Image (cartoon, rainbow, N blue to C red):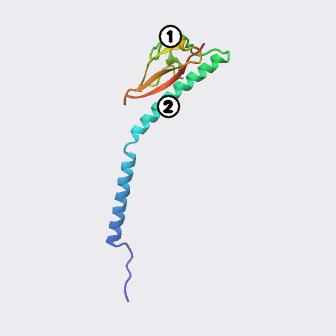
Amino acid sequence: MKKSQAGFTLIELVVVIVLLGIVGAVATARFQDLSGSANTAALSAVTGELSSAAAINYAADASGGAAAVTLNTDGIDCSATGGANDVEDLFQAGAPPGGYTLTGTLNCATLGAGGVAACTITQTATTNTSTANIICTS
């Protein structure tokens, strides 16, 4: 009578370890550079917030309501803070999130109500930039 042994052979164990190593190497390479994608998505979100807020602000003005921010003069500095009718006031928090700066000048008197000007948003950690469209009010 032969005794039967249970278990795995050495070759089977080596094959499993090699396969796990390959899967681990592929997964590491795939998830290694997610910070770049996250930074791009965050910049896109901040740009979208400002552009959407400008559209809502214009819609309130055009419908006869009171615009939260009146953008109807030339030389409006996108990066101005502390004054009335700053572009930064369009953000829900009253300023862009930390780590972002705005640059550019709006000439809304020249463009007229409904004219579209641009502010450049820079992510300071990566120096990536994006452009938000700002709609001038009456």
Within the image, what quadrant is residue 115 found in? top right
Q: Residue 44: x, y in percent? A: 48, 32
Q: Quadrant of the C terminus?
A: top right
Identify which residue is drawn at 34% across, 66% down.
Answer: 15
Q: Residue 28: x, y in percent? A: 36, 49
| Residue 124 visible to an observer of this rendering | yes
Identify which residue is drawn at 52% across, 29% down.
Answer: 48
Q: Quadrant of the N terminus?
A: bottom left
In this picture, residue 114 sits left or right of residue 100: right
The image shows residue 20, relative to residue 110, as above or below, that is below
Residue type at tag 2: Ala
Q: Residue 27: x, y in percent? A: 39, 51
Within the image, what quadrant is residue 130 found in? top left
Farthest residue, direction front = 110
Identify which residue is drawn at 36% across, 62% down.
Answer: 19
Mark count: 2
Q: Which mark is residue 74?
A: 1
Alpha carbon of mark 2 to alpha carbon of mark 1: how far? 27 Å
Q: Residue 88: x, y in percent? A: 49, 18
Q: Nearer the viewer, mark 2 or mark 1?
A: 1
Farthest residue, direction bottom = 1
Q: Residues within 10 Å of mark 1 (few under 14, many from 20)?
A: some
Q: Pick the residue in front: 53 or 130.
A: 130
Q: Could you tell me which secondary element the residue under label 1 belongs to? A: strand
Farthest residue, direction right = 64
The image shows residue 82, relative to residue 130, as above or below, that is above
Q: Which mark is residue 45?
A: 2
Marks 2 and 1, the one that precedes in the sequence: 2
Residue type at tag 1: Asp
Q: Could you tell me which secondary element the residue under label 2 belongs to? A: helix
In this picture, residue 59 sits left or right of residue 49: right
